[in-house]
Image (spheres, grey):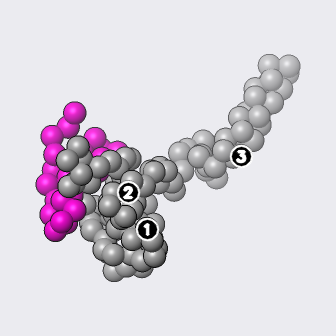
Amino acid sequence: MQRLSRRLLWFITLVMVVAASGVFAVSTEGQIMESLKRRAPKVDPVAVNGVRYEVTRGPRSHGFKQNSGIISAIEEASGKELWWVAVYPVVYKSGEEQDAQDVFVTSLSISNDGHSLIVENEHGQRFSVRLLDHAIVEAPSW
């Protein structure tokens, strides 16, 4: 009986901690499972020559068919969005949750020569976006 009570107490504590974190959910069968809703990592914007480059939030509102991998260029003085670019495609498989298939940007940096934006994603891919014409090339990994 005491062993059952300890297990029950442990389970209830675990469920409370996990539920408070928002990272996991409990199924109707009582099994703990990872939530399909993932949050995009916080990526600090970078700026060069008065233009700030950042990960676009809600890119579908700008006409994109994917929810990740989109970068915005914003004029720092006015806050005006200058352009957006899909750095890499995200291909969604039908029948699966789209948010679980997103591939998020994990870092942004400016190239040493200041002419390109370096974008890395959670798959370890690196891309170079030429700031002059927004041309994109996949860069070699570190």
Identify residue for label 2.
47
Q: Is residue 82 above or below residue 19?
A: below
Q: In the shown orientation, is residue 110 left or right of residue 27?
A: left
Name the residue rendered at 77%, 34% in the picture: 13
Q: In the shown orientation, is residue 141 left or right of residue 12?
A: left
- Which amino acid type is marked by label 3? Ala
Name the residue rendered at 15%, 40% in the picture: 140
Return the disc, 2 or 1, that comes first in the chain's sequence. Answer: 2
Determine the CA span between mark 3 and mark 1. 37 Å
Report the quarter where the N terminus lies: top right
Instruction: Evaluate if marks 3 and 2 touch, with contact meaning CB atoms under 8 Å apart.
Output: no
Q: Is 13 one of the magenta-colored residues?
A: no
- Which amino acid type is marked by label 2? Ala
Q: Identify the magenta region.
A: 118-142
User: How far across and down, in percent of the image, does residue 120 sit?
Assistant: 30, 47
Local crowd at mark 2 within 10 Å, few (<14), some, or many (≥20)? some
Identify residue for label 1.
76
Name the residue rendered at 27%, 68% in the picture: 85
Q: Is residue 60 above or below residue 124?
A: below
Identify residue for label 3.
20
Q: Nearer the viewer, residue 37 or 75?
A: 75
Q: Is residue 133 above or below residue 101?
A: below
Q: Is 133 one of the magenta-colored residues?
A: yes
- Is disc 2 placed on a helix, strand or loop? strand
Q: Nearer the viewer, residue 60 or 19?
A: 60
Determine the CA span between mark 3 and mark 2. 36 Å
Nearest to viewer (mark 3 / mark 2): 2
Nearest to viewer (mark 3 / mark 1): 1
Q: In the shown orientation, is residue 23 left or right of residue 46?
A: right
Instruction: Evaluate if marks 2 and 1 touch, with contact meaning CB atoms under 8 Å apart.
Output: yes
